[in-house]
Each structure stands twice: as structure tokens, then as C-alpha cells.
Amino acid sequence: MSRYTRKAILFFCCMTLLLAGLTGRANDSARLPDALLKKLQEFQRADNLADWIYARLDHVDSDPANNLDFLMATQQAAWRSYYTYPEREAWFNLLLLQGYHQLQAGNILASINAYEAAVQFYESYPLPLANPDEYLDYVLKPLGNNYTRLADYNTALYIQQKALALAEKKNNRQETAAIYSNMATSARWKGDLAGAVRYCQSGIRLVNRKSSLYGLLLSTYADVMMEQQRYDTAALLCRQALDWLDAFHQLGPMEDATALWYAGALQLEVRLALQKNNMQRAEGRTAFALSVLEEYFPATRQREKAKVNVLSGEILGKMHRYKESLEAHHQALRLLMPNWLPGNIRQLPPDSVLYGENTLADALAGKAEALAALQDVDAALAHYLAVFRAARQLRREFYSTDAKIRDLQVLRERATAAMQLAWQEWERTRQPRYQQQLLLIAELSKAQVLMEERVARLKTGTIPMTDTLALRQYRLREAVVTYQHELATGNAPAKWRNLLQATEYELSLLNKKIRLTAAAGLPEPALPDAGLLQTWYSLLPADVIVLEFFEGQPYSYLMELDRNGLRSTVRLPGRDSLRQLIPPFLQRWFTQGAAAMLNEPQEYYRDAHAIYDLLFGHTQWQPGRRYMLIPDGVFNYLPFDALVTEPAYKADVRQWPFLFRKAIVSQAYALQTWYSQQTQPYLEGQLAAFFVSRGKGSTQPVLSVEKEYALLKDRIGAGHAYFNEKATWQAFRQLADSLTVLHIGTHAVSSSLDSFPYLQLYDRPFLLADLRYKRFAPSLVVLGACRTADGLLMEGEGVNSLSRGFTAAGAGGVVSGLWNVNDEAATEIMALFYKALEAGDDPALALHRSREQWLEAHAGNPQLQLPYYWAGLQYSGHLLPVYFGEKGLRRYYWWLTAAGGLLLAGARWRYKKRSEKARRSTG
């Protein structure tokens, strides 16, 4: 990209900061002193942009809190961009001061936007626009800390590593120690406790032991020890930190940074006191921490004060002083939203003042808990629902999927509390609105990141490639994919991981700009509400019943609904009990092979019925109805079809009452996800299959895919069946965006084994990241590889499997395997499956019928009737027929011809109307 293009992009970024939600434009002349207004006009007439900016900054410094709108309106008020070196320097100072003053006001998102603009501005010019010390101290350090406050720890660590490199280059031990402290905090909250310990120890080795920074490092180290549940060590380090920082407090006025560190150490002491159930100590030290902040920051650092108020509210709640707890949480909200003027303490902030901020979500949840304790159930539930709306705005600011998923895991605790409250009120009153709220809370806490990823895929390609930003975005995306490929194969030098981080960060900033343009395309997915729920379930086919799970603690829930709404709700055992039951069941009877089931069929029968009775003991299966299950948490690992519905054991496995024989079952990630898949348009016509026994040069075991290839080749068509040498990465990539059905029979590596899930094609692996920036919307993906539905469990998002990855990428439905499916059985079932698809069955019905036919064909072999052989494949997605092959093409061409005929008829009608109008006008 040329230097001038980069200038244009940077100026665009600066000029659109206000549109990104920083603030509204202030009217410059509305309240400015006459002398300042005259000076600004003189500078503008003289075309002196630099002094004009500095005059505005001087005015802001006189009263930052009241002049913030004026500061943020500077870019819009400017009559032109910067040209000269002094003007660029002034503009850079403007950006960093905008970030600083927004931080002081507690607006983290606005502060981040300004600091991000400063980073791009500084790094986009060859001339040193500012002293590197200023860039480190006034941009990188506060920006990294802001990302930590936002809970985007991956991004925080990336920025902090940039700052560390600068500090080490200067050989500044004190600066380096301070950055290590910040990195330790990010690593601690990210869950990398070993890394956090290393950063703390590195900082302590470098720090000047006479400085207050030493107290901060001790406090940070204590926090890490507490997270490791080493409470005695944490208490000792916390005491040392407080003794050290208190000495600075006793000497007289502290520096602002020291005062913040002192207040932070006091809050850590409070948490340690809570761990020991010492409520009086916790309450007293919380009040002292708040007094320190009020003394040193009477009009600023509102976010820090809000955090202490939230902590105070938590303590008061534990002491059953619920009215005071409510007041503390309400005060936290007032600090975070100064323009909100509630009429009473139970009032909910309107959505117009909510924004993405962790402390705001904590305050809303704490207030909800206090309201519930005071028996104000409706207000409590309203506040819980507001937590989800605020969280959506926070996720919008994250650039990494990891950060979004981590945020959802925190939300699960709030969702569980809200579910329990709604259930209790439903049990007490039997008012349907509380039952409806159970379903709404379940949907709000489920597969939200997956839906956001799907919508992002659909946006791909909506921006013209002639657009400068789109071209830059395309190149950055290609670079990301390249780095990920090389890192996945282990061929990349170590520095490539840093290059990947840098490229992803630059791409995230560019995406923010593109999001502000009209070319951004499709809107983000709607957040579930009561009206949308009705829209979604009203589209259910008439014969379909949904069973939606919610896994919580101490209780889980099962909701039954159809196109007319909720039918029933059942409370189930909680997460802890379920996780002691379901994973061992899968491990013993399926993951380790068929031997256990063959040797102890009666034991399997007992376990399978026990789980069935626990989950479905109250379910009345309706004849002629189909069932769509929406699992949650550990329920995602269950082979539902393999459960048995009656307690009495029969020696002949052919007489076992499997759930499979009672109901046709499919799955979905959420009702919202299913609606997206059900209503999305799909291409019709082309099917392609890729079969790889072992990749070129790979040491993986050889797969027996020859029979699968032979059985499916004739049905698929030889021209679209790629075997071994022909099943290349390039062939796969070229076809990915034009398929109706994609069938894959090859080695698969899930995220539980590798940081980059992939399918092994002949010449190189195909990463799911390869689909990240491509339009990909096949009606059906069939994953013949083993354990493609397996992976690490992500709270609220299902299993991080290849199946989920293809769903997020845009697939309408996915057939995948829960365990290492028997090759011969899977191949024969797949052949029957495609035959049923061609006959017009939707994938769920086709999979069910193919297994019925396979079991009937092997009725003479009782061993093959065991569910290990036939229940491993599952289907998740839409309930629509899939048109492919010649039938699909004929249907496609029929629709094309029909559309052409309609267009021609419309053209003739318009021509006729114009002719008649012309004749009338000349008549």
C-alpha cells in the first residue's frame, strides 16, 4: 500500500472516531470563552492547524471532565488534514490525549479507539513523530491495560510485548519491570498462570526495590498465587505489598499511579478476607480502598470506583444486607453511566446508555442478585437480561474468538442464576411469561459466537474489490491464512507466530473501519428476544418438536417446544452430577472401541437406560413427530440414539428399545442457529467428495477409504470424486464456495489435539481457517473422518469440533462422527444415506432411514446391532431436502428458466405500459 493511501486510511480513521461511539460532536461556539473562540478563528484564518489543535488541548486541560465533548469533536471541527511535521505531531498528541481523558472518564471503549488510532498514526510514518518514550508510556502501556480491562487478553499481551521490546531496547529496567507486571495480569486472567508467575518473577528481578512499583509487582504476584489457590503465599505477598505501599501513603501525597496500586492491593486484601469468610475485615478495607480513590481522583477514575462499589455490594450481599448491596451496585452503575438519571433505585438503565464494559456487566448482575433477594423478581430478571445486551456490545470490540468465548463462559454464571430465578417464579405462579424467559435465557447464553462467525462469513465478498480498504483486507486475510498454515505444519520459524499476531491485530483495526462504511453489508445477528423466539419456532415444520437443554449448577433444564411455543419445562440434575456420568459413559462404551460393549452388554444396557431415565423420564414421545435436540454443555457428547428407553434387559440386542426406534432425532446448536440454517439460500447441483488414505509424506495411519470411494463414486459421479493424489488443497479450495454437498473422507485433527483444527488432504492440511475469509454455504457437509464431532467443550458454544467449525463457516448442515466409527459400517450407511437424499429426504430423515436399512440388512448378525457400529454418526442443521447431481442441476435450470421467463414477461409489460403512455401523450 502506498504512503498516500495509508495517509488517507489514517485520516479516515481519525475522522470517524466519533461515529465509533466515542461521543457526540459538541458545538464549538456554544460555550467557549470569547478569547478562545477568537484565538481559534485567527489560527484557522492563518491556516495554522498545529497551534489551533494546541489551543484546544490547553482549554481541555483547564477542566477535562467538562470539556471532554469539546476534545472529542476536534477532528470534525478541523477544516483540513495535517500536512507538515509539526501538524502531524500535534495530531498525534491530540489522539493520545483523547485516549487518556476518555480513560480518566471511565469510557474504556472510547479510550481504546483513540489509542488504536494513535498506534496506527505513529507506526505508519517513517519520521519519528514522537519520542519513543512518549509512545511507550502514553500509548502502548495504557492501550495494553485497556485491553486487559476489556478482557481481551490476547490483544493486551500482543500490545504489551510490543511495549516490552521498546523498553528492553532502551535498557530501561524500571519500564521493563512495569510492563512485566502488566503482562502478568493479562496472563493471569487469560488462564496462563505459569506465564503469569514468570512475568512476576522477571519484573521483581528488575525493579528498583525502593520504588512503589515494587509494591505493585508484589500485589500482582499475590493475585496470581490466589488464583493458584496458594492462599497462605498470597496472603504473605499481599501483606508485603500493602506494607510497602502504605509507607508511601504515610509519607504524604502519593503519585497517582501509586494511589491506584495501593487501592488495587487493598481490593486484593478484601478478596483474601472473603476467602476466609472474614466479612468485617472485608467491609472495612473496601471502604478504605474507596476513600483512597475519592481522595486522589475526586472527578476521575470512575471505573475504578465502580469496581470497588461492586465489590462492596458483593460483600453486603453475603452479609444478607440486601438493600445496602442494591445501593452499592446501583451507585456503580451511576458512576459508569453519568448521563443516566434514574427515577428510583430499581430502575433499569435503557439500552441507549449501555455499552461494552466488564464492570458494567458485573454491576448489572450484582444489582439483579440483590433485587432477587429482595423478592423483586421482575426487576431482577430485567437486569439479568440487560447483562446479555451489554455483553453483546463488549464482544463487538473483541477481535479474537478466544476472548469472545471466554466472555461467554463468564456469562454462563449469570445465565444459571437467571434460569434458577425464572424457574422458581414459574413453579410458584405458573405464569407462562416466566417459562418463556427460561427459553429466552437459554438462547441468549448459547452459540452466540457461532452465530456471529456465521454472519461474518456471509459478509465476505460484499465489499467491492476495487475498494482500497477491501483490497488491504484481502491481502491481510491471505497473510493470516499463510501464517496459520506454516505454524500448523511446524515448518515456520518461531517469529512467525509474532507475525501472525501483528497481522491479525492490523486486520482487526481495519475491520473496525470497514464496519463503519455502508459497504459493510449484512447486519450482525440479532440478539434473541421474545419476538424473535416466536419468529424462529413458528418456522418449525409441523411434525417437529424441539428439546432444548440448558446445563447449569445446581440444576439443568430441558424445554420442549413446537411451532406453537413451549409445551413443557423440566428441571434436571446439575452440571457436576452430569459430568461425573456422561463423559465416563462415552469413554467406556464408545471411545475405546467395541470390546466393552461386546463383553458386557447388560452393563451397557443398564448405563444407557439410567441416562435416558435421568434426562427423558418425563418426556412423552409423540408418534409421527420428529425431534430436534439442542444440547448444551456435556449433553453435546451424548449419542442420544444409543440410549435405551425401557429398564428390562433383553439378551437379544435386536429387541433393545433404543431411542432411535422411538424417534427421528437431529440436532442444532441453538434455535437461532437452526433458523439461520433453515432460511439461508443454498446452491443446487454440485457434489464433491475428497478421499485421502494418507497424506503425502505423512506418518499418520493409513485409512481404508477405497471401499467408501468405490461405493460413492458412481453415485457422486467420477468427475467430482477426488482420491489421494487428486484430493489436493488447491482442488478443495477452488470448489469450496460452489458446492451443494461436500463429502470428506480423510484424517481429521480436532482442536483438542492441535491449536489449528484441520483435514489432511493429500498434499497439505486444509485448516478451517482456510474457510475463514471465503464464502462457504453448502447445503450439507458430510465428515466421514473419525471423531469430527469431538473436541474441547466450550461453555455455551458446544464442542470445539470440526463439525462446529463447518457450521460457523456457513454450512447448512453437518454429518459428523462422535467416535472412531467402524469403517465398513460407516461406508455402507453413507451409501444408503445418499440414496435417501436423492429420493428427497432431508439429511436428518435420510440418516435415520439409512441406519434403519443397514440394521435390517445385518439383522442376522447380533454384534452389528450394537450401537457402537451404527450410532456414531449424527446430523446437525436444517431440515430441508438437499438437491445435487443431475436432479439438482435440472431443478436449478428449471428455476433459472422460470426466473428468465418472469423477467421477460415483466420487460414486455413495462414496454407495453410505456408505449401506451407515449401514445396518450402524443394523442
Image: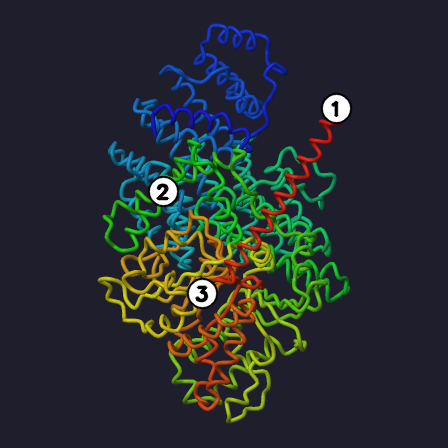
Circle 3 is placed at which residue position?
782
Q: Is 48 situated left or right of 201 in this image?
A: right
Between marks 2 and 1 in the image, the one whose residue lies nearer the viewer: 1
Identify the mark nearer the N-term, 2 or 3.
2
Tell me the SS state at disc 2: helix
Q: Give me the C-alpha separation between circle 1 and circle 3.
A: 62 Å
Between marks 2 and 3 in the image, the one whose residue lies nearer the viewer: 3
Circle 2 is placed at which residue position?
158
Q: Is 675 situated left or right of 800 in this image?
A: right
Q: Give me the C-alpha separation between circle 2 and circle 1.
A: 71 Å
At label 1, which amino acid type do we have? Ser
Quadrant of the rendered image containing residue 739:
bottom left
Query: Crowdedness of circle 2 by 10 Å Cα count: few (<14), some, many (20+)?
Result: some
- Above or below — where is 566 with respect to 915? below
The percent position of residue 300, horizontal first and vertical second, equals 54, 31
The residue nearer to you, when weighing 1 against 316, is 1
